[in-house]
Amino acid sequence: MSEPRPRLVGEVFFVLLLLAVSLFLLGSAYTISGFESFASAGAVPMAAAGLMAVCALVILVQTLRRPPDTTEASTLRRLMVQVTPPALLVMLVLIVLYVLLLEQIGFLLVSFLFLLASMFVLGSYRWFLNLVVSVGTLGLIYIVFEELFSVVLPAGYLWQGAFQ
Amino acid sequence: MELVHAFFASWVDPWLLLLAAIGTFAGIYIGAIPGLSVTMAVSILVSFTFKWPIHDALVLISGIFLGGVYGGSRSAILLNIPGAPAAVATTLDGYPLAKMGLAGQAIGLSTVMSVIGGFVGIAVLAIAAPMVSELALMFSPRDYLLLAVMGLLLVGGLTGDSMAKGVFAAALGVLISTVGLDPLTAEPRLTFDSLQLSAGINFIAAMIGLFGVAEVLAQMHYLHVKAVKQNVTKIIPSWALVKQHLPLSMRSSAIGVGIGALPGAGGDIAALMAYDHARRSTKNPSRPFGQGAYEGVVAPESANNASVGGAYIPMMTLGIPGDAVTAVIIGAMFIHGLRPGPLLMTETPDLFWFIVGSLVLANIFLLIFGMTGIRIFAKVVETPKAFLLPVILILSAVGAYAINNNPVDVYWMLGFGVLGYLMKIYGFPVAPVILGIVLGPLLERSYRQSILMTGEDPVLFFTEFFTSPISVILLLALGFSLLVSTPWWKRWRSRGK
């Protein structure tokens, strides 16, 4: 038998969260049609949520049985290495901004800004190259999707009427 | 005659021919670049191609599937990084071969063996699928229930480090599929009085999130992994080398088709099983296993490409995905208004033969592209992640948006992306979620039909399972697959070792 993997930071918390969500969903599934009949609308959702809750319990026991991480580093430090490296957090913020602004500012401009910013975050510091790659890929994506796939990309509410 | 016409449809139409070539070519690179997966590519692609004619979409997807399963071996050999899960076994002997300066030979051999495996898989698909679909017409709802449960348990039990985690993921997928209005009674389910939720959760948004965004986030941990370059010379393997390994390739292909055809088990498991088989059955390997044995490349590469044809069998005949990629393809077919299953097979056999023809075509392109362009290839695989990952994110967002031109789908994608990332980090497999979402409606419908047929009598519901030979056989298969994934079985297998 190989040595069991030590618990990661936040692993117990994550499993507890899954357990709580499963129980909540089980409760919600019960309100669909209760124990009215075996073929009711709520039967399968209840079974699935119940199975999730049981599995989450088993996983919780399995996780607690594994040895805790005994390295010296602080919890925050370990969290940053194991779960949320700084680059990931910054990227996540960028993605959320991208998604929120996509419809307002329009695909081309917001994608361009997103590409430039995220390339920088991910460690490519050659501005000119980043610029060329961003413009190049965006141009390609735009042509391929608008022409080949006939996808209507968001043009941006903000500019509506501005160029007419 | 009409079927022959359907078979060759993609060969004679220049546009379809081009799509097959593009698909296979792109598939090889998608499979080879670590961080890009076939599942990711097909998920994103589905959201763009749903306005296309179904034939165009199917040709492109078939090419990407076959090319992608093969492409993983390239980076496994050259970089010691499996480009796709199906190539994990190939790294074991492929990379040592490259270190000895035999990268070209390893790539050439894996190309030939992939193509052979691919043809075996397609041949079995062509022969077995029509028979299985004839049989499947006799299946009752409870048999579909058993098959769906088997698929979910297999994908849950065989992937990841704990069966409970796999089953949790599968159950989550089934639960997600039930959100919205009940198809039978139109009661709102888990909608929390939200109009958006009563339409259900768009599963393509979920797919793109789980396989696209989650994978990109996971790649943030490997930003600074540097690849070691290998020199590639002499790719085309000698006929003697191919002939010598042909028997092993055939046996591995058989394993590959079999595993691929099991609902829920795909190329990664097929490759590992074939590698294990090669290690046990080869008395005098060219070099010791793990130190650059050709056999260690031949077996997994034949098996994983053979599993593609195998995975199409339950998909086409029963509407049950063989693995995560076929789950996504089933999703694509749903969007095009097709319901994969025995009726589709018997009512539109031309579509089936069209798919078989496209797979054969893609396999031929695989041979051509596999033997050429290695030099450019080495460059492309080294594309910095700083360029690659942002572009994938943009494609994911546009893909999710394009399904309904609805920003809510993009939010779902993001939510599933973060969920998928956390699941990956904490050792939960992600593929069962997608299988659950795709199989959920089938599972629920067949369960409710079969319990209604017994007058909602739970005792009768259970005893009914023992009344037809098909159900009994499926029940035994289900019991066996459950047994195989228990720790007791593993202990029994490894006794005396």
Image (cartoon, coloured by chain):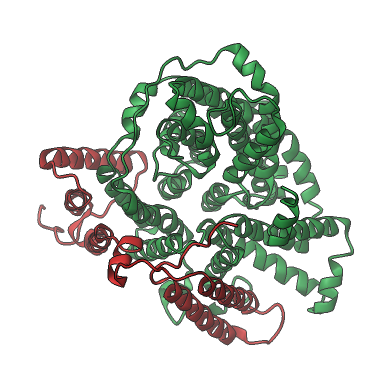
Chain colours: A red, B green
The answer to whether residue B81 is above or below residue B434 is above
Q: How many marks?
A: 0
Left or right: where B178 falls relative to B38: right
Whether residue B486 is visible to the viewer of this picture, yes or no, is no
The answer to whether residue B141 is above or below residue B28 is below
Taking the view exactly as shown, the residue that stands out farthest to the top is B239
Left or right: where A40 falls relative to B327: right
Q: Nearer the viewer, residue B335 or A55?
A: A55
Seen at 66% across and 64% down, the residue is B443
Left or right: where B80 falls relative to B311: left
Whether residue A118 is visible to the viewer of this picture, yes or no, is yes
Q: Please tell me in which quadrant of the rendered image residue B276 appears.
A: top right
Seen at 49% across and 33% down, the residue is B73
Q: Position of residue B478 (x, y in %)?
A: 75, 59
The answer to whether residue B47 is above or below residue B475 is above
Q: Position of residue B264 (x, y in %)?
A: 63, 52
Seen at 46% across and 21% down, the residue is B102
Q: Position of residue A137 (x, y in %)?
A: 24, 40
Left or right: where B142 falls relative to B56: right
Q: Nearer the viewer, residue B41 or B59?
A: B41
Quadrant containing the N terminus of chain B is top right
Q: Position of residue B115 (x, y in %)?
A: 58, 26
